[in-house]
Amino acid sequence: MSPFSSAAVVSYRLGGLDGVSVEAAKWVGALRALDLVVWTVAGEGDADRLVPGLGAWTEEPPDRGALSAALAGADVVVAENVCSLPLNPAAAAAVAAELRGRPAVLHHHDLPWQRSGMGDAVPDDPHWVHVAITDLSRRQLGERGVGAVVVRNCFPLEESGDRRRGRAEVGVEDGVRLALQPTRAIRRKNVPAGLEAARAVGATYWLTGPAEEGYGPELERVLAGARVPVLHRPAPVMADAYAAADVVLLPSSWEGFGNPAVEASVHRRPVLVGPYPVADELRRLGFRWFSLAETAALGRWLDDPDPELLEQNREAVRRHLDLADLPGRLEGVLGRLSRRRGGPARSDGTGGGSSAPP
C-alpha cells in the first residue's frame, strides 16, 4: 500500500522515443499499478499538462504560475531528469524551487558532470529521495554529498516482434544480414564505429534515430562515405525492428544506461557494445555482449549462432531488470520518501527495498 495517493511526473519532454520518455512512461504505469492517480507535466511532447518554457532548449523561462498549477494537488512529484541535466537551466531551477519542502523523487537518468560543460551539482532537499539508474551514478552522487538509491531501468519480457514484417518495412530481403543501431544520431552514439562493425560482419547497416544536437551535417558525410548498404529511417514498431535484425549495435562512447543492449537481449539478439562505463556494470548482471574489439568473434558467432548466449542474456533481464518488478521497487522508494519527511537521506544507497541487485 502506497503512503501517497497521487503523483505528478514532470520532465522537459515526455511521450517520445528518447530514453527518458520511455522510462518515465514505465514509471507512470508502475505508479498506477500502486493505485496512485498520476498525471504528466512537460514542456514538449505528449503530456497531460504542457507548461510553456519547460522544454529542454526553450529560450523563455517557464511560467511559474503555470508550473505551480500543473503540479498542484500531487502528493508526490517525480522529476524525470529535469533537475538532473540542466538542458534548460531556468526550467531546472524553477522545478527545483517548486519542489522545495514537498515530497519528491528525483529520477536521475543523466548527471551534469557526465556531460561536458553542464556543471558539477544537482539540487537537494531533506524532503526528496534521489534515484539513480546505475551504481556508477549513485556513487558519483554520494561523492558530492547526495544520497541515492538505485532503481535500474526495467523491461517487458513479453514483447515479441515480427521478423518478416520488420524486414518488409525497410525493404530488406531474407538472407541479407542486418545490423541495427536503434539510437539517435549524435556524436557520442558513435555512428562511424557502428558502420565499421556492420562492414566487419558483412551486414547492411540500419540507423533508426534522427540527427540531433547539430550532428546532421557530419552524419551526412559519414553515411555518404559508408562502405556498406545504409538504411537511415525510423522503425515503425521497435519490436519488429529487433526481430528483423541479426545483430544489434550500441557502439556509444557514453550512455546513461544503454537500453538498446538490454532490449536486444529481451528479443534474443546478439549485441555489440561500445566502451561506455555502464556496460561493464550491466555485464556483471550476467550479460554476454561483444565489444567493439570483437567484431571477428561476432562474425563467427553469426555464422554459427550459439543459442545459449542469447538465453543467458534474456535470463539476466528476467532476474534483474524485469518490468513486472518495478511497482514493488517504486513502492519501496515511496515508503522511504514517506519515512524521510523529517530528515535527510542517507548516503549509503540502502533502505526502502528499492535498490536493484548489485
Image (cartoon, rainbow, N blue to C red):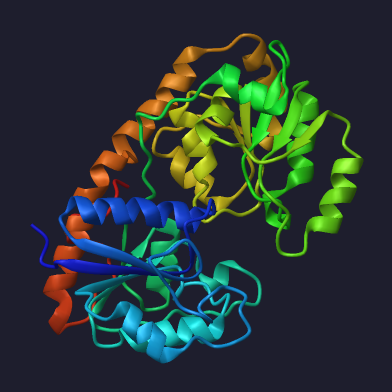
Residue 299 vertical position relative to residue 32 in the rendered view, above or below: above
Residue positioned most to the left: 1
Q: Position of residue 53 (x, y in %)?
A: 53, 82
Q: Position of residue 150 (x, y in %)?
A: 33, 57
Tally the numbered discs. Answer: 0
Q: Residue at x 41, y 53 (%)?
A: 23
As drawn, is 100 to the left or to the right of 120? left
Pick whichever, 74 or 270, lies toward us.
74
Q: Residue at x 54, y 23 (%)?
A: 243
Q: Position of residue 36 (x, y in %)?
A: 18, 60
As drawn, is 220 to the left or to the right of 324? right
Residue 354 shows up from this direction: no
Residue 132 vertical position relative to residue 244 in the rendered view, above or below: below
Q: Residue at x 59, y 87 (%)?
A: 60
Pick whichever, 235 or 50, lies toward us.
50
On-image quarter of the N terminus: bottom left
As drawn, is 204 to the left or to the right of 62? right
The quadrant holding residue 332 is: bottom left
Residue 278 shows up from this direction: yes
Residue 282 vertical position relative to residue 315 in the rendered view, above or below: below
As drawn, is 170 to the left or to the right of 26? right
Q: Position of residue 187 (x, y in %)?
A: 73, 56
Q: Residue at x 35, y 76 (%)?
A: 146
The quadrant holding residue 241 is: top right
